[in-house]
Amino acid sequence: MRNRRIFITITVVLLAIGVFIAAKVKFVYHQDHEGIFLLKGQKGAWLEVSDDLFPEESHRLLWGQPLSSMKNVVTGGACDSSIKPCLNYEWNEKTGRGFIKSLYPDGRKLVINLGRFRDSDERTVSGLFVGGGLPPSDPDFKLFNKNETGMAYYDGRRYYHIWCNVNEGIFDAANTPIYPSQWQFVSSKVFENSQDDLTIVSRHRVLINNVPVTIERFLFYQTGDAFVTLVTNLINVGSRPTLFSYMYGDEPWVGDYGSSAGNVGWLEGRVALTEMLIDTRRYTYAGIFDYGNPLAGESHDFATGKANFIEWHQESRPDLAYFSNQFGVIAPEEKKVPLNSQNNRVIALQWGPRVLNPGQSFSFTISVGMADNDPKTGFPVKPDTNLY
């Protein structure tokens, strides 16, 4: 009888310990099936077990084992870049995450990560949003090389950061942001999957001022291009009008991840060293150029010379565009406020405020990518996007 009581007591204690430990272990299932990753816990948890790893979590990684055989993705597979550029990509239709990689005969690479990041609210993103890092199973994955996140360029020697996680969102009538991680992810599909052309769509649903709105985003990419074209459609499927604004921007840290030092704005025929509004009727594109800003006490010697660009179709041009040291704050150009933030020199586009009536749609088209450099001057040159 005494032994039985001891056995029951020990069993209860062990179960209590097990329940306590289980409460301290958090299991996160992203449905990406990238592998098994043990992360240092946070918010009271000792340990976190996940099936994927995002760049924002790399500092918490304790142990990981990629398991590419578990993944269920549409893929371009291996490609031979010895003669001409070739396309390698993965897209998980169920979770809305993946990447595009163009490989060139001379060893260069362009990497475009899509939906593989945590948003400003620390929630994961699903859909065709530029940002994040390569999956751990990819041969080019480097745990602590943040330069290869977002949109990145490898010149045969090193990676250069071109675009970061996109700062994109919808603002409601109260000017409250609705980030992509707050959008309900409905579905995604690879529409075109050929040797040279890739077309993907992701579908979402949001409430704007408590009015349901559906969102479709199409991505178009051709092998060898240094940009993607994005078409975004919003449709009011509710029974009353809703007021909204749409913002697309970034503090892209061109050249090296984590630093805006050296970054200036550029437009056709000029660079922008100060905060300024961009006349979207006169200009059809703008970008950030890692050039060095003398107004911020920077020389041109340390800059990488890399540049990005964003181009808009004039039929859906943004109502507002600007270079600044802070989103939403633009000093008049005559005040000549230098672009001098060490980590927050931004380019931003905004559509609206606009009213979307029941059954009405709103659409805009942009191309986002890396600019070339004029071999004589070193200044950026936008590639031909065929938007016009």
Image (cartoon, grey):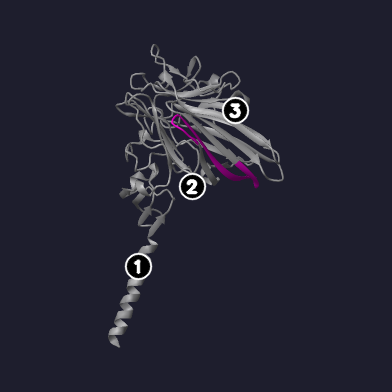
At mark 2, the secondary structure is: loop
What residue appears at the point 39 percent right and 36 percent down from the top-left corner?
A: 149
Q: Earlier in the sequence, mark 1 or mark 3?
A: 1
Circle on res. 18 = 1
Name the residue type under label 1: Gly
**Does the magenta-highlighted stretch encompass residue 90?**
no
Quadrant where the C terminus sits is top right
Q: Are the residues flagged by discs 2 and 1 in contact, CB closer than 8 Å?
A: no
In 3D space, how far apart are the residues under numbered discs 2 and 3 (Cα atoms)? 32 Å
Q: Position of residue 269 (x, y in %)?
A: 49, 14
Name the residue type under label 3: Pro
Decide: few, some or many residues near mark 1? Use Cα within 10 Å; few <14, some 14-19, many ≥20. few
Question: In the displayed structure, does residue 363 sit left or right of residue 1?
Answer: right
Which one is nearer the viewer's eye here, 185 or 325? 185
The magenta-colored residue range is 192-214
Residue located farthest toward the left when viewing the structure as drawn: 3
Which residue is denoted by mark 2 in the rendering? 94
